[in-house]
Amino acid sequence: MQRKVFQLLVDNQAGVLSRISGLFSRRGYNIESITAGTTSDPRYTRITIVANGDEAILDQIEKQVGKLIDVRKVMELKPDSSVFRELILIKVKATDNQRQAIVSVSDIFRAKIIDVDMDSMIIELTGNQSKIEAFLDLLEGYEILQIARTGIAGLTRGSADV
């Protein structure tokens, strides 16, 4: 099973994201993550989709998405020529005795403590997926109360544009 990151430039119209996700659903394709946001030109939205499958399925995904009427451009973001980031918010149960250790681990990863309560902390971390997974591994000894992840956002390096 392979994994590909696709970036779409689409018209900023109501229902575009629904049509794209509907295509995946109808064809039985799985979306690992999907992120969307308006570009510097408000007429367009940039959508990043991470999908899994064999080579034939991933090629079919790229072709089918490209046929949708609101899709202006589809491009595979290759790891060696792109930058990927993900945001994660983690709420961790933290007693007085645990708080400093959690802060120390967070500092190593350049994570931000964005909320502290009597019995918990919320940590914000941005990075590639391996950095986020490594951070979660180090928090394994603590009780994680909630996690919210954005999914991958990415851009090509250099002056290439989607």
Image (spheres, rainbow, N blue to C red):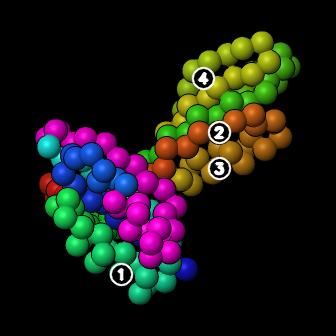
Q: Point out residue 56 in the picture as x, y percentages from the top left corner.
A: 41, 87
Q: Which residue is mark 3?
A: 134
Instruction: Look at the numbered discs 3 and 2 and tell me whether their residues touch, using CB distance below 8 Å.
Output: no
Kind of element beneath mark 4: strand
Q: Amino acid at mark 3?
A: Ala
Rendered image quadrant of residue 95: top right
Towards the viewer: 68 or 46: 68
Cα distance in 3D space between marks 3 and 4? 17 Å
Q: Amino acid at mark 4?
A: Ile
Location of mark 1 (residue): 60
What is the number of the mark on residue 147? 2
Q: Looking at numbered disc 1 in the image, what kind of residue is underneath it?
A: Gln
Q: Does 60 sit left or right of 101 as displayed? A: left
x, y (%) of residue 91?
68, 30
Circle on res. 113: 4
Marks 4 and 2, the one that precedes in the sequence: 4
Camera-side residue: 145 or 17?
17
Q: Earlier in the sequence, mark 3 or mark 2?
A: 3
